[in-house]
Amino acid sequence: MLPGAEFPTPEVQKAGWLRSCKAMPALARGNGQPCDCLPPLRAAAEQLRQKDLRISQLQADLHRPAPAPAQPPEPEALPTIYVVTPTYARLVQKAELVRLSQTLSLVPRLHWLLVEDAEGPTPLVSRLLAASGLLFTHLAVLTPKAQRLREGEPGWVRPRGVEQRNRALDWLRSGGGAVGGEKDPPPPGTRGVVYFADDDNTYSRELFEEMRWTRGVSVWPVGLVGGLRFEGPRVQDGRVVGFHTAWEPNRPFPVDMAGFAVALPLLLAKPNAQFDATAPRGHLESSLLSHLVDPKDLEPRAANCTRVLVWHTRTEKPKMKQEEQLQRQGRGSDPAVEV
Amino acid sequence: MLPGAEFPTPEVQKAGWLRSCKAMPALARGNGQPCDCLPPLRAAAEQLRQKDLRISQLQADLHRPAPAPAQPPEPEALPTIYVVTPTYARLVQKAELVRLSQTLSLVPRLHWLLVEDAEGPTPLVSRLLAASGLLFTHLAVLTPKAQRLREGEPGWVRPRGVEQRNRALDWLRSGGGAVGGEKDPPPPGTRGVVYFADDDNTYSRELFEEMRWTRGVSVWPVGLVGGLRFEGPRVQDGRVVGFHTAWEPNRPFPVDMAGFAVALPLLLAKPNAQFDATAPRGHLESSLLSHLVDPKDLEPRAANCTRVLVWHTRTEKPKMKQEEQLQRQGRGSDPAVEV
């Protein structure tokens, strides 16, 4: 693999490595012997990556906000909320993660499991986590090629974030694989709840207190999803008797990923419960929940599912037409500035 | 000069650069063309040298003794940040305002001026403000029909939020018109800064501390705007010497609404300074700033405008196809549930 490919830092691109590296096989053919240049370039790329990580750590140490004196010490009694967030590199990634991390910073006793769709931790995400002031575990797993969205495919064709959410479940059950933050999984007997929070939704801080005391699986409405103002469970006499949804109402669990939370002990008691990447469209949530609970035992929250406290917002992909024009003129935005 | 010679770190030697670099002239002779590999290797060596410098700087910063027992300034000592947010009714309005209000709740000594594009206060926004826990002033002014975006017109045809921002400026200067929250404008001599924060952008909490001590007009980069990774001032020796932008670089102030803040005393000293709804596309910010400051006197913030702490994010308009179908069948989402 080319150093640039495994590690396209701005400097590397500026320095034109890719160009010259691509030129090398030709050189090699030219003199009929393997080119001597790729190994040292790879070595240099690896050294640069190491130094970038070191710089990230140091910058994070410097920028880490002072502990807010405002919060009174958290009552040990509160169950921990484990928030599982799959994320992938894109123009709006940092904006989304900054916004989400600031929301999570308002919630006491919360542990953020951020799982990158990547071979390893990226400097951008490592820096952001270290500076967030949150208790976190940093994980990374690349979505297998076969599962990845093809160019031009509509987003719903393949569920996104499956491998990443399952990696977080693995860590909760047996630990291992953490590339940053808290390395050890919750000790046996930990009281907690697990919530799958994508990085582009909008969350009211109130939502987290609704889910904190989940005994099995709790549910609530989600706004602006499925082509509706909201989707959510129908509740009678405090029990879930159906679901308000337009899409396949007969799915075992017609709920959005943002619409439920699972008690940690239940997840640990069902080691086979995970998301199935091959589940048909709209059945990903059911592929996990079918292992865990009977629909009639779902615990309605948010005032018997009459309050919307999470919204399935989507952020537009920014257009970069001017950027491409300026770059052709060598006047593109400084790649050293992280966006 | 060989990179190894100019820069013999242990890694470099381990990686065997010197060997392979020395091998290159031979290679070059071998195929009778100059070897492509020396320039990228030199570039790599230079990059490694730069990073080592950066690392030692950061380590020095870290080991520098902390400033004497941090006495966090009394909140009363901090200038107030007046955040002016125009907003209008739409499907994602509540989600956006919840998200923004939670970000603002992380900032001490902040006063939110929320201005609805409506004849009067709406219950949704009034409830949201009351529940936000923020110090706020609720204003409302309807955009005149002539200025309103026609159905199907692209968003940039008419600047949005002009009347609303000007109403907030009126309140800061002379009070009056508040429909909720704090009714009295800042008393004479109040130290503060005014920032125009639309309800769909993404703001790092760090941004607000960058602007708090603004003397006249402070500026910084804005991410994902103008078709670029970021737009922002160019700074030399601590002064703004130009702007990185693709759109009409010769505008008096080629800055985005989210890219500047104005000291309250300056705004009060220039009673005629306001936004001009008839300003040509991209000149709305200039229509205010031209009253207030000479471009050369802009105060660069965010590490001399090298850090992006605000992003011009846009939220997709949710599709409501299924909602319309269900409503035709009398099974639409319960209108009593606020979304």
Image: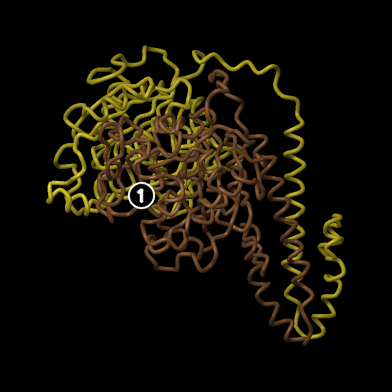
Chain colours: A brown, B yellow
Left or right: residue B89 compared with residue B214: left
Residue at screen point 51% across, 62% down: A327
From the top left corner, tell me how far across and down residue A198 is, in percent. Answer: 45, 47
Q: Quadrant of the N terminus of chain B?
A: bottom right
Q: Residues within 10 Å of mark 1 (few under 14, many from 20)?
A: many
Left or right: residue A123 compared with residue B119: right
Residue at screen point 46% across, 20% down: B109
Residue at screen point 52% across, 31% down: B210
Residue at screen point 55% across, 64% down: A144
Residue type, mark 1 in image: Phe
In the rendered image, the vertical position of residue A108 relative to residue B295, given as above or below: above
In the rendered image, the vertical position of residue B167 relative to residue A250, given as above or below: above
In the rendered image, the vertical position of residue B299 relative to residue B191, given as above or below: below
Q: Quadrant of the C terminus of chain B?
A: top left
From the top left corner, tell me how far across and down residue B201 is, in percent. Answer: 40, 41
Q: Nearer the viewer, residue A159 or B134?
A: A159
